């Protein structure tokens, strides 16, 4: 899932300027699950903006909406009348949702209320960890199901580095496990340690962002 958190309220207020009529749009997908942009968070942000504007002596009218998925046109169209009725739309979705509304309604100002962080795994209540870098060439089968690109702080192809101590990463030993220690432990458990003797060649990044914006086309679905 895409993990995000809300921008600081002052940054949001700076974007809104002297806006008097605002539509805040949340999303019931990833950002709702990570408690950043669902119905509750939309309501909280609306209250914060109203209070701040009242203190400034600049009252504001705010409408709250939440789409099922802000990354798909059919769900955005369900609130089209609200979008057309407001000059500024504050999106509480990931960047995909923000860009989709901007694309669909070219004359509207669409601002992001969230900072999307990464694709991550929920580990416990209120805690998510980045587990996938979306590099376009998944090698989890070769490394015991643990991604050395996303989870190694240096994205090493042949680890660990000299900074791994007692299974911890030198970047933050208190909070980050050494990904290569995790890989070693997992491969040992699976009886596949011999696979780690192979020297990994330099990674081709052409499947990642180095090739520009990526696109997936499924002809079997399109036809």
Image (cartoon, rainbow, N blue to C red):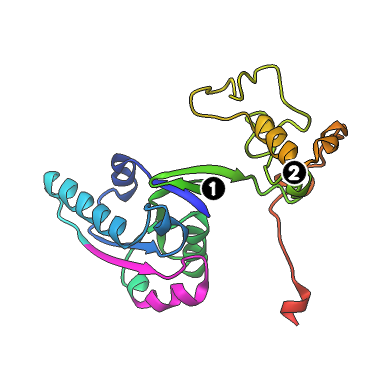
Image position, residue 192 (x, y; %): 80, 40
The quarter of the picture where residue 148 lies is: top right
The quarter of the picture where residue 161 lies is: top right
Gap in angstroms between the C-alphas marked 2 and 1: 24 Å
- Asked if the stretch drawn in magenta spans residue 108, the answer is no
For the point 33% across and 40% down, which residue is it?
8
73 to the left or right of 61: right
Image position, residue 49 (x, y; %): 22, 51
The residue at which mark 2 appears reads as 190
The quarter of the picture where residue 154 lies is: top right
Numbered mark located on residue 73 in the image: none
Mark 1 secondary-structure assignment:
strand
Q: Residues within 10 Å of mark 2 (few under 14, many from 20)?
A: few
Mark 2 secondary-structure assignment:
helix
Of the numbered discs 2 and 1, the one sitting upstream in the chain is: 1
Residue 196 visible, this angle: yes
Q: Quadrant for the C terminus, please.
A: bottom right
For the point 68% across and 34% down, which residue is it?
185
The residue at which mark 1 appears reads as 120
Image position, residue 214 (x, y; %): 70, 55
Comparing 60 with 219, the one in front is: 219
For the point 86% across and 31% down, which residue is it?
197
For the point 73% across and 51% down, which residue is it?
136
Residue located farthest toward the bottom when viewing the structure as drawn: 223
202 to the left or right of 152: right
Residue 115 visible, this angle: no
In the figure, 144 relative to 196: above or below? below
Q: Which residues are magenta?
A: 62-81
């Amino acid at each position: 899932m895409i993990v995000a958190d809300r921008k600081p309220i002052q940054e949001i207020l700076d974007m809104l300027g002297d806006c008097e009529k605002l539509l805040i749009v949340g999303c019931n997908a990833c950002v709702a699950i990570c408690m950043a942009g669902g119905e509750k968070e939309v309501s909280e942000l609306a209250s914060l903006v109203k209070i701040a504007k009242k203190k400034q002596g600049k009252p504001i009218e705010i409408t709250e909406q939440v789409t099922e998925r802000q990354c798909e046109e059919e769900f955005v169209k369900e609130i089209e009348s609200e979008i057309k009725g407001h000059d500024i739309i504050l999106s509480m979705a990931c960047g995909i949702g923000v860009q989709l509304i901007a694309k669909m309604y070219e004359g509207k100002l669409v601002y992001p209320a969230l900072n999307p962080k990464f694709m991550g795994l929920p580990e416990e209540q209120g805690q998510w960890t980045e587990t996938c870098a979306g590099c376009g060439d998944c090698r989890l089968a070769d490394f015991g199901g643990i991604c050395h690109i996303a989870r190694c702080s240096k994205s090493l192809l042949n680890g660990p580095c000299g900074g791994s101590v007692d299974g911890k990463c030198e970047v933050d030993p208190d909070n980050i496990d050494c990904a290569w220690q995790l890989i070693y432990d997992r491969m040992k458990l699976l009886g596949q340690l011999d696979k780690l003797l192979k020297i990994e060649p330099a990674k081709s990044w052409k499947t990642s962002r180095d090739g520009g914006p990526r696109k997936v086309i499924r002809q079997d679905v399109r036809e």
